[in-house]
Every structure is written in structure tokens, then in C-alpha cells.
Amino acid sequence: MLRRLLPPLSLLALVACAEPVDITEDPYIAPDPAGDPGAPEACDGTSPRCGAGTLQAVGQARYAQRLRVPSPLLRGDHDLVSPAMHGDLLVYLSNEDGQRDVWAMHVGTGDRFRVTDTPEDEDSPRVRDTRVVYVRGERAFLFDLETGVERQLSERRADAPALGPNGEIVWSEHDGAQWDLVIEWPTGSGAEPLHRPGGLVGDERAPHLEHGSVSHAVYFSERDGERRPHFSEWPENFAYDMAHDEPMPGAIGPFFNLVGRCWTDGRRVTVAEPDETVDWDVYCARLGGPTVALADVMPWAAGPGAQIVESTGTWIGYRDHRNGNWDVGVGLPGGEGELLTTHPANQRGLVSGNDLLVWMDDREGSWDLWAVRRPLPGSGGPLEQPEVQAVEAGPGYVELTLAAWQRGRGDLGGARLLVDGEVRHVFADDARVRSERLVIAEPALRSHFAGADVARPSTGSLGMQTDQVVVSLETREGVELIRAALRADGTTPGW
């Protein structure tokens, strides 16, 4: 795989967005499974569930780009639960064959594929780049989508594995007395305690990793019978402790992202043994010293009933019980949460990748996956010419690395991708930067390009018949913006 680094260039084009479409009151049009080229691999005749209520992808790939109102993304007569996302890659659990297996879908193309196929249940899937982690039989596992190899991470009871941006894997492991966080980094080096010596007193749970000046892990530490959000910077091993005037009993799931650190807070809970439906609220904080001052801790989603934070990504996702059922809400760091759904059925488990929000919905009697497009932060401002930082080619694909900070603002409309002078893909007029990585790949290519925005050539083929190709990008007016000669066999550097 070759990468050709380029100086920042001003471009006017690129991304896998489709033409805008008018959505009717019922935007779901069920495709014919027999004629759907993106039908699930599990329905090749080997699955006992095929032929009756087959899992359906809504409108195939085109609807993944046109979900302007909440609409079903995947549904069937079985449960689809525990979604997780990175970029346009969605992983989830399906029990279509009885047990819960990990499946994945690249929402940009509609491609779905099975990740695990075992007689045991899998739980707690997470994805980043080409790595998927999950729990099976109370042990943590890692699956590499590129190699197809599964590796067991833990020998002891484990829970909630999480992935970092630099190859880190952290999970909570029980030593027979308490839960401690362990980390593997570099990849394959073996697990070590996150905190030394001896870890911290109390259970360390719910790890989460993100990318900033350092990698962070967030977890619970149970001290004096109280569960509190607790933050740690790794590898500096510097701990943040939340400052507050009163206990936060039974706090659920601290999560955070680069701007705000959020958790479910019980300071307004008054019952001795609270369940999930009492008066929980979502609080967020900013980190900036050895402790977090009360002035930096603020309610983010608060109101009657329970608000419980569930995920952070492009957006912060939470579920809300104020109407007597679970709805999902969403918002941005520094802002406040707002309800996304109001259907009387239950919705929960909201996750986000790029500008897509995905959640679980049981309005049809089983758990389906629903989705909606939400413009990226900053996308309402003036459009900018995007910057391309790298170009890569391999067998059957071309990849551009774009400036991440331009998400939603970079104007990629109407561009043409040429390979050896032939137009191979034309981007939609409303195309925008949605991801750092943009891939144009052959329809038959099974590489997953996790975390990338993926489009199929509008000509049907990229025409990569030779080892060396010249890739260029033109505006809709025909102005050439970039040209690079690359090796297309994925083995040697180009020039």
C-alpha cells in the first residue's frame, strides 16, 4: 500500500454523498431481497432465517446518504442491538441464527458482512479503523478486519473493551477481588495494569479512549461505596478526580470526547435503590488541572425523568425517559441535548459516525436499527475549498486523506476523479467533506476501509489494469486540481 504525501492543495471536490431527495412521510421502501446485490452474506442459503423476514438494508446504499428524517436502516424479524460506529463503519449484534453474533455494515455502500460466527453470544462490540473488539464467554477478543484473524485478549473475566487511535486496547478485568483497568499497547505486547503500582482502590469500569495531546481513559472508581466519574491521562498516568459538594450515587457510564467529558449524574436522585428511570441527568465537564472545579461541571441534558448518556463521537448521544418510554437525544459539546425521537416505542443506544446517527428502535416488535443524517458541526457556515494531505492507491481503490477540521464545510460538489485520463467517478453536486479519509473502490472489493467514507465508481470500474496509474481530480468546470502518479499494486512507492 503506497501513500503519496502532498503539500496542502486547494481543491473543489469529493465525497460519497448522494443527490438530495424529497423524503415522503414513509421514507422506507423495502427492497426485494432476491434482487438486492447488497443482501447480507448470512442469507446465501446457509442461514436458517433466510426466506422469512430477511434482514433488509433500506434502499441499499442510496438511502444511507438520504436519511433526512428518522428512518429504518436495518431491520428484520430478529433483534439488531448494541450498535457502535467509526466513520461510516457500523458494527452491531444480530441474533438471526439464535445466538448474538457481531455483524458490520459500511453505510456508505450498503455492504454488510458477518464478523463472528460462533455458538456463543458476543457482547459489547466496539470498532475503530479495521479493529473490532467484543466480549465472548466473559473474555475480551480482538478481530482484525484486514487479516480476518481473531485474538483473545484476556485470560480472566473481562468487560467493556475499548479501542484507542494509536492501537491501544483497554478493558476492565476482574482479579478475583475487584475490577481493574488493563491496557495493551503496543499491539501484541500483552496486557498491563493501567495504573501502577497496584492500581486504584475500588472497581475501575467503563473505559473509553480518545485522541488529544495524550490518550485518555475514563472509568468508574468505587470509593466508600460511591460510584463517581474518574478520569486518567495515559501514558502519563495522571489522575483527575471530580470535585463536587455531594455524592453522586449510582452514576452510570462516564463518557467523554475532545471538548467535554460527560457522565450520567445522580445528584438529584432521592430514592435509596434507584433504577434507570428515576431522575438522572447528563453532566459534562472540562479538564484543566489536577482536579475538576465545580464551575467547570455543568448539566448538559436535564429534565423530568431520566437522561442517561450513551455515547460520544461526532455527537453526544443519550436516552431520555421523560415521556414514559425511552427516546434518544443528541447534542454537541458545549451545547445542550435535544430529543431526536418522540415515538411511543423505545429507542436507545444512539451512536454517531461522521454525520450519521444510528440507534435501536423496537416500534415493530423487535429491535431494528434506525438512522438519520445530521449536518456536521460547522456545516451551516460558508463552504471552503478542501485540502488534500495524501493520496493512496491500491488494487481496485483510490484514497484521499482530507483535512479533518473541514468536515461539513469542504465543498466537494461536482468533482471528477480520473484514472489515466478517463473519468471514473463524478461526485454529487451537494457533496461535502464528511470524513478524513475518502475512498473510491471497486464494487467487488472486499476491503473494509474502516473509518473512511466510501464511494463506488460511477462508471462501475476504476480501470486499474496497470501497476502504475496517474490519478487526477478536476472541478466540474474541468480545472485540474491535483495529479499524482502512483503504483496501483499496493506494493512499492510511486514517483
Image (spheres, rainbow, N blue to C red):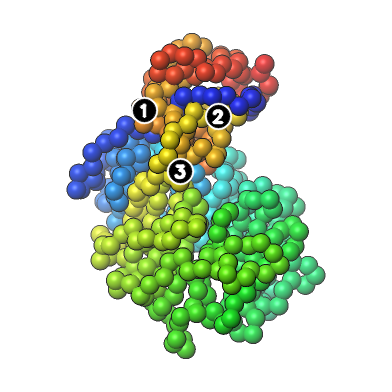
Looking at the picture, how far across and down is residue 179, in whole percent?
Answer: 65, 73
Residue type at tag 2: Glu
Q: Which residue, given by chain and number where applicable, does mark 1 sit on?
A: 428
Q: Residue at 33% across / 72% down in the picture?
A: 322
- Mark 3 residue crowding within 10 angstroms, few (<14) / some (14–19) / many (20+): few
Q: Which residue, given by chain and number where applicable, does mark 3 sit on?
A: 378
Residue type at tag 3: Gly
**Under tag 2, what secondary structure?**
loop
Residue type at tag 1: Ala
Q: Is residue 100 above or below residue 46?
A: below
Q: Quadrant of residue 380?
A: top left
Between disc 3 and disc 1, whose residue precedes? 3
User: On the rendered structure, is 409 left or right of 229?
Assistant: left
The quarter of the image holding the N terminus is: top right
Q: Nearer the viewer, residue 444 or 423?
A: 423
Between disc 1 and disc 2, whose residue precedes? 2
Q: Quadrant of residue 58?
A: top left
